[in-house]
Image (cartoon, rainbow, N blue to C red):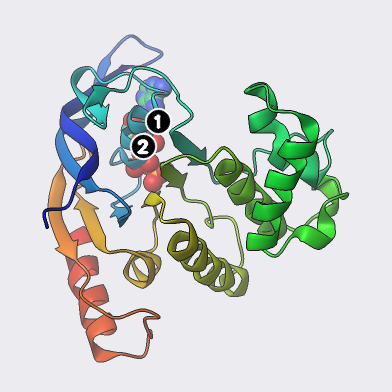
Amino acid sequence: MKEKNILAVNGVSKTFTTQKGDKFLATRDINLQIPEKSFTCIVGPSGCGKSTILRIMAGLEKATTGEARYCSSPITKPCGEIGVVFQEYSLFPWMTVLDNVAAGPLFAGVKEKKRHKNAMHYLKMVNMEGFKDAYPHELSGGMRQRVAIARALANDPDVLLMDEPFGALDAHTRILLQKELLKVWQMTHKTIILVTHSVDEAIFLADRIIVMSKSPGQIRREIEVDMERPRSRALQKFGQLTDSILKELE
Ligand SMILES: Nc1ncnc2c1ncn2[C@@H]1O[C@H](COP(=O)(O)OP(=O)(O)OP(=O)(O)O)[C@@H](O)[C@H]1O
């Protein structure tokens, strides 16, 4: 059976106007087809436009030419079907963990009891149910990011866009959260697109890796990661693919 594409980026270029008024081409002619329920990672050198592409897919930024589409409709503004998790833990500091996770559906007009039940479901999924009454400042970086993931999931989006979600974490916590994210992905069947600087992270997580060139960012290569999960970093195949992508990025 043919895979259904849930999200598409068609010929997207983005030109920014700098403070001085100069034009700056950040990305050029990006084309992507994202199959439903797939896990895609985007890697590329700093400044190649990874976040820009993600922001265009989230409806937070407008393409200069081309467009992003969700289920064949143009994405023109943020919508409930597409959730976003950023590197900085964007939690509300004045709300408890439970209220943070329940905040999205709150704005959609869902009653408190139902919102809290829904929030607890996702807090359990990310092993944070024991911290439901804590405030964000009482949590470690890894815990805050778990809550941010639960919060995005609580809105029940079809697509989860993640911009360097583990970038600020120490190596051990990062590996732990990668494993947890895979578990969440397998349980929820969401489509995930994750931007990362880490080639290792991309190979560990993704079905498919998009390798971008330096600015103005273009797609250099798309790689299907044909390795069974859970993937061991000790595998020769893992090391070979890492070397090959790193060479491409040099
Ligand atoms: N609002 C803006 N105004 C002007 N230039 C911008 C703006 N946003 C991004 N840029 C520029 O566009 C380019 C791409 O930025 P972007 O953040 O998408 O890159 P990136 O690949 O995600 O970088 P990094 O890996 O370092 O986070 C960069 O050169 C950046 O300076």
Mark 2, Cα crowd under 10 Å, few <14 / some 14-19 / many 20+, is many
User: Amino acid under label 1?
Assistant: Ala
Q: Secondary structure at mark 2?
A: helix
Q: Which mark is residue 190?
A: none
Q: Position of residue 148 (x, y in %)?
A: 63, 46
- Considering the image in quadrants, where does the C terminus appear? bottom left
Q: From this viewpoint, is residue 25 visible?
A: no
Mark 1, Cα crowd under 10 Å, few <14 / some 14-19 / many 20+, is many
Name the residue rendered at 40%, 80% in the picture: 230
Name the residue rendered at 13%, 56% in the picture: 221
- Considering the image in quadrants, where does the N terminus appear? bottom left
Q: Tell me: 77 left or right of 178.
A: left
User: Amino acid under label 2?
Assistant: Leu
Nearest the camera: 23 or 169?
169
Name the residue rendered at 25%, 79% in the picture: 227
Q: Tell me: 161 left or right of 165.
A: left
Q: Residue furthest top?
A: 21
- Label 2 to label 1: alpha-carbon separation: 6 Å
Q: Image height check: is 166 above or below 86?
A: below
Residue annotated with mark 1:
58
Residue annotated with mark 2:
54
Q: Quadrant of residue 90?
A: top right
Q: Secondary structure at mark 1?
A: helix
Label 2 or label 1, whichever lies nearer to me, is 1
Nearest the camera: 24 or 172?
172
Cβ at disc 2 under 8 Å from ligand 1: yes
Marks 2 & 1, CB-CB < 8 Å contact: yes
Q: Position of residue 113 (x, y in %)?
A: 79, 37
Nearest the camera: 8 or 168?
8
Q: Tell me: 57 left or right of 188.
A: left
Q: Quadrant of residue 247?
A: bottom left
Q: Position of residue 25 (x, y in %)?
A: 22, 25
